Amino acid sequence: MRKKVILITGAAGEIGSALISSLTAQGSLPILSLDLAALTGKDAQLTTHIQGDILDKSLLSRLVSEYEIDTIYHLAALLSTRAEFTPEAAHHVNVEGTLVLLKLASEQSEWRGTPVKFIFPSSIAAYGLPDLDTKRAYTRVREWEWNYPRTMYGCNKLYCEQLGIYFSRHYRQLAADRPVMLDFRCLRFPGLISAYTVPSGGTSDYGPEMLHAAAKGVPYACFVREDVQIPFMAMPDAVTALLRLTEAPRESLSRLVYNITSYSLTAAEFRQWVLRYFPEAQISFDADLKRQGIVDSWPADLDDSAARRDWGWQPAYDLERSFSEYLVPNIRDRYLVES
Ligand code: AKB
């Protein structure tokens, strides 16, 4: 008999680490993790980790022969800034990697006669507002508005959302027998802020970078203008949202792709929050016009009313609680231990 597991791809990344802890704490099925990198620290004890490439078909076949995959959290991706330097490589990882896993989940759904849940993190990068006047006029953007991404990463996410919907609803629509289809569910995340990891390769990274630099006592030059505004969320809420969406009864979902958000603030306001807790922090602004352009195309805020209505989404961490209870104490501990 194969062992029933939850598969997490990109498990060594920011969300992966937080998700592994939460799933373990709630006594989930055993976790099989996959990443090009090794897992470090306590995460390594909590999963069966496979160091490898999601595009390695023989590796995936081996996994399927040993494990019954019940749920997939497909987190592996090249983020927005990194993807601009190597757009074809980003397409390869972000799109072809997702396609391979959707295929695997489809086959597994048929084999077991029950849908495999496929949980996919998308992003505010799936939106693209053409200019600042439009961004000011359309603040709380809804899921179907402004789907004109201007980054490779955003294009990849938007297309993979559609692929997921296709595999969930229309796969093999001309076949004689309707297959058991996978159960695709997707969240469009705002910029995420973790107390434990400094993100790399993203364009919303200026927020967490500011905070981590302040905690380390090193100066930081923010790469966007002071008035730039996008939504953010503390990592525990991001993980809660993934788990809630996974558990939601399928009949309660009126859509397969949901916006979620916690709070929205400008880069200057972010700096003010950091200064409240680290008054000595040296944070300046030195906008990189190109990266700035990417953030300018992202919505100032998201409308997450569908998630609130359908599966009771409600962030637990507002700005005050994010900083005072989660970010600052844990970041302080982290750099104290390191120093
Ligand atoms: C990025 O900046 O690329 C990501 C995202 C907004 O999805 N953090």
Image (cartoon, helix red, strand yellow):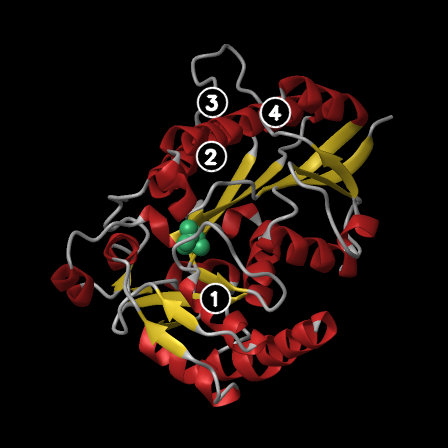
Residue type at numbered disc 2? Asn
- Does ligand 1 reach within 8 Å of label 4's beta carbon? no
Q: Earlier in the sequence, mark 2 or mark 1?
A: 2
In the image, residue 277 lies at what x, y percent? Answer: 52, 87
Q: Earlier in the sequence, mark 4 or mark 3?
A: 4
- Asked which secondary structure carries label 1, the reply is helix
Q: Label 2 to label 1, Cα distance in Å?
A: 24 Å
Residue type at numbered disc 1? Glu
Numbered label tally:
4
Q: Label 3 to label 1, Cα distance in Å?
A: 42 Å
**Would you name the residue on which mark 1 appears?**
209
Q: Label 4 to label 1, Cα distance in Å?
A: 36 Å
Q: Residue at x 41, y 30 (%)?
A: 91
Q: Label 2 to label 4, Cα distance in Å?
A: 16 Å
Place residue 288 in its image quadrant: bottom left
Between circles 2 and 4, the one closer to the viewer is 2
Position above or below: 95 against 209: above
**Would you name the residue on which mark 2 appears?**
94
Q: Label 4 to label 3, Cα distance in Å?
A: 13 Å
Furthest residue in direction top, as rendered? 176
**For residue 48, side relative to residue 14 (left or right):** right
Badge 2 vs badge 1, beta-carbon distance below 8 Å: no
Q: Earlier in the sequence, mark 4 or mark 1?
A: 4
**For residue 153, side relative to residue 39 (left or right):** left
**Would you name the residue on which mark 4 appears?**
104
- Asked which secondary structure carries label 2, the reply is helix
**Which of the two residues, 253 or 200, is positioned nearer the viewer here?**
200
